[in-house]
Amino acid sequence: MNFYPSPSPSSLHYVDGEESKKQRKASDDLARMTGGEATVATLKAHSIDLIFGLPGIQNDWLYNALYDAGDDIRVIHTRHEQGAAYMALGHALATGDVSVFNVVPGPGILNATAALATAYGLNAPVFCLTGQIPTNKIGKASGVLHEIPHTPEVLRGLTKWVDRANHPTDVPRKISEAFYQLRSGRPRPVALEIPMDVLADIGEVTIDDVRQPFAPSIDAGAIEEAAKLLGEAQHPMIYVGSGAQNVSQEVTALAEMLEAPVVGYRTGRGILDSRHYLSLTMPPSHEYWKKTDVVLAIGTHMRIPLQQWGTDGVTVIRIDVDADALHKIKQADLGIIARAEDALPLLLNTVEKYNHQRTSRKDELLAIKADWAKHTAYLEPQMTYIKLIREMLGEDGIFVDELTQVGFASRIVMDVYKPRTFISTGYMGTLGYGFPTALGVKVAKPDVPVVSVAGDGGFMFGVQELATAVQHKIGLVTIIFNNDSYGNVQQMQKNKYDGRVIASDLVNPDFVKLAHAFGANGYRAETIEQLREALEQGFASDLPTIIEVPIGDTPSVDRFRRLGKVR
């Protein structure tokens, strides 16, 4: 991570609007532009046509430039900075490409940090473009509007790269470096500060050429060794995470070649279609783990098996673009530093020469799935709701989970057909992330149905973004499972702490009336058929839809979180 100190006050000065206009009028050189214009031009050069943001005085000259850009860059302005950042997260997760959000410094950037932390945990390519106080005031503690100390240090823990542009001529180079970082190696958020005087000032600007991202070269010998281990294995298994989202076809082909079950949890769901007999969720893979001899982990830390199930007699092969990830939790027996997109085609071709004749494991794995279905049958009414949502979403629909019992159950029982159609908060477990993140998903995929599930507690974290959804006609359907409590917390208080219920009961609005007050569609569904009808109505509308489902206590999935050591 790089951060360059500000130049001295003598080398930069704040340019107010009138002075900037005079400089512009005096110049006939089209390469001369404000820092704001340089920002917009560089974003366009990197194929950005959308930005989520919240304007403010430190970003005035950026929004002036966005206004002048017309329809080239769409601006979706939110009602809170966390909303802008979460929407960018959802957009990035749904597309697999960079999404940009912009906020003011100080309280603005601090409001966005929960979303940045979630993006960091999910390996999401989110670009935080933040304003900053005047350059000659940074670090002076003089009480300038929105001044906080050590902003780069705050951002460093939540991003892979942080920098500051110190002059309009800096802007294209720094933005280009941000995109290079976003698209090179492990995808994680980046942040760039552009002070308000830099956005307003004028300089001779050259828009840099788009750099090709870095990808590590592949060790052919390691590919050969991995192919030999997998080809000779009797009971191989494949675990996939977010790093395998772009290799669904290759993973499917490799699994079929090896008769190897493929396991995805949260960020790996849908890489292999759940309807395939080789597709397992995390808990049922616990049974197969007992006899697994070689496991291939693609773009995942594989935390649960490695931490809880035991690894005696298991050879672990990792493919990960991040060298540091190869030895997380447990030292890999064989580590391959590579993008999955580069490594999997080579591995597929090489496995063929080592693979032996294999008998189909279809009957065995279907039996494991059937047994698993018996173990989860008690999860009602969650199972009934999930089955209906799955049916209504169709082949391409997208589901966004939340920290609610329906969301927890979905991670282990919901069928997911395609990559990037099951959006999860991952290990960060950020309550309230779901609704605003799902809005970003729907912006990215306006032509497919998107469902966000939420509890009443989590939904209220971002309720104000319902106004954003109405204003920008974001036709997301959100189901609020309302039990008038922080249900998961209260369940733990009752079951683990002798009924010491405290600070978990909630007083809620009438969610249907609330939706109507915002100008959104609002329905209450007290039966499964009413929920079906409400989903049909919501999917047919270009306005956001809120469906309130009253729900009582529900059974927990906690018994599947720690399944015990089997090796």
Image (tube, rainbow, N blue to C red):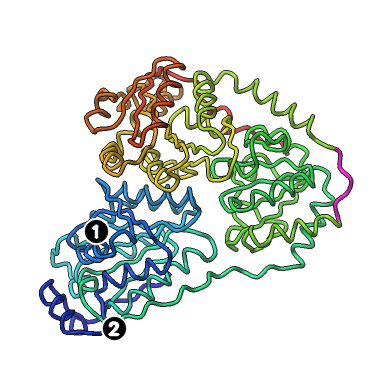
**In the displayed structure, would residue 521 be above or below residue 86?**
above
Number of the label disc, if any, that sits on residue 104: 1
What label does residue 204 carry, if any? Answer: 2
Q: CA distance from mark 2 to mark 1?
A: 26 Å
In this rendering, the answer to whether 124 lies above or below 466 is below
Image side of residue 370 versus residue 299, left or right? right
* Circle 1 crowding by C-alpha within 10 Å: few under 14, some 14–19, many from 20: many
Q: Could you classify mark 2 by the number of other residues whose Cα lies within 10 Å: few (under 14), some (14-19), or many (20 or more)?
A: some
Residue at left 61%, top 52%? 244
Image location of residue 532, percent across then percent down: 45, 21
Tell me the magenta residue range: 354-359
Q: Earlier in the sequence, mark 2 or mark 1?
A: 1
From the top left corner, tell me how far across and down residue 120 is, in percent.
45, 54
Q: Residue at x 86, y 38 (%)?
A: 359
Q: Look at the image and tell me in which quarter the C terminus lies.
A: top right
Q: Please state which of residues 120 and 495 is positioned toward the viewer in this rendering.
A: 120
Q: Amino acid at mark 1?
A: Val
Residue at 52 percent of width and 18 percent of height: 380
User: Is 352 placed left or right of 347 in the picture?
Assistant: right
Residue at x 79% of width, y 29% of height: 363
Tell me the chief SS of the magenta region: loop
